[in-house]
Image (cartoon, rainbow, N blue to C red):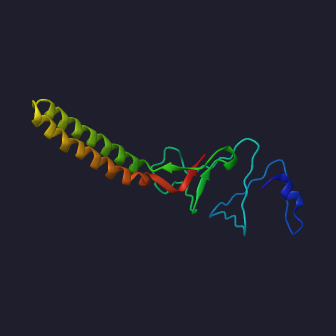
Amino acid sequence: MAANDIKQHTGEQIILSSGRLVLNSRSNDVYLNSKRYINLSAGDKVTIDVGAIDSDNEENMFLVNAPRVQFGLDKNGVAEPIVKGEQLDQIITQLMEAISTYTDMVQSAALTPGPIMSAMLGPANSFLKSRFQQIKYNLDNFKSTNSFTI
């Protein structure tokens, strides 16, 4: 929301204006609710701190519960899915294992002379092609369906 949007509002509103504002709850939570938007805007940066930096408490987290999360503005580029680290790790591991197995099969074939070598390379090539097709089928699994970045 731009500053002009605040000035153009014609309904009921409360404006707090001061050199500094502090909202503090000593014994419970703080809630901000809105029918439409909650806008945070700052001239330099917006920070969110949750718990101590060196805390081992798993409850200390910044949780975003939304059907879609986007980092960056559309005007700066096309939103791309964020990579899911564990799924990407699995796919890269599968690729490395497939290439390693293929290399072993080709190396064994290279030690075998003549037509037997050709007969051994066929299954090696079929194996690699099959594994790559399986991996390709799972490629979309490492892309988030609701977290995007520009």
Q: Position of residue 80 (x, y in %)?
A: 56, 49
Q: Residue drawn at (73%, 41%), measured in percent from left and top? A: 44
Does 94 sit above or below residue 31? above
Q: Quadrant of residue 68?
A: bottom right
Q: Residue 124 versus residue 87: which sits nearer the camera?
A: 124
Q: Quadrant of residue 137?
A: bottom left
What is the residue that sits farthest to the front in this orientation?
A: 115
Q: Position of residue 58 (x, y in %)?
A: 46, 55
Q: Residue 27 versus residue 29: which sits nearer the camera?
A: 29
Q: Position of residue 2 (x, y in %)?
A: 81, 53
Q: Viewed as shown, does residue 19 lie left or right of 27?
A: right
Quarter of the rendering occupied by the N terminus = bottom right
Q: Residue 42 versus residue 111: which sits nearer the camera?
A: 111
Does 18 sit above or below residue 111? below
Does 13 sit above or below residue 136? below
Q: Residue drawn at (32%, 52%), measured in percent from left and top? A: 134
Q: Viewed as shown, does residue 11 lie left or right of 135?
A: right
Count of numbered labels shown in the rendering: 0
Q: Residue drawn at (10%, 31%), measured in percent from left and top? A: 114
Q: Position of residue 96 (x, y in %)?
A: 30, 40
Q: Viewed as shown, does residue 47 lie left or right of 82?
A: right
Does 145 sit above or below residue 113? below
Q: Residue drawn at (49%, 54%), measured in percent from left and top? A: 144
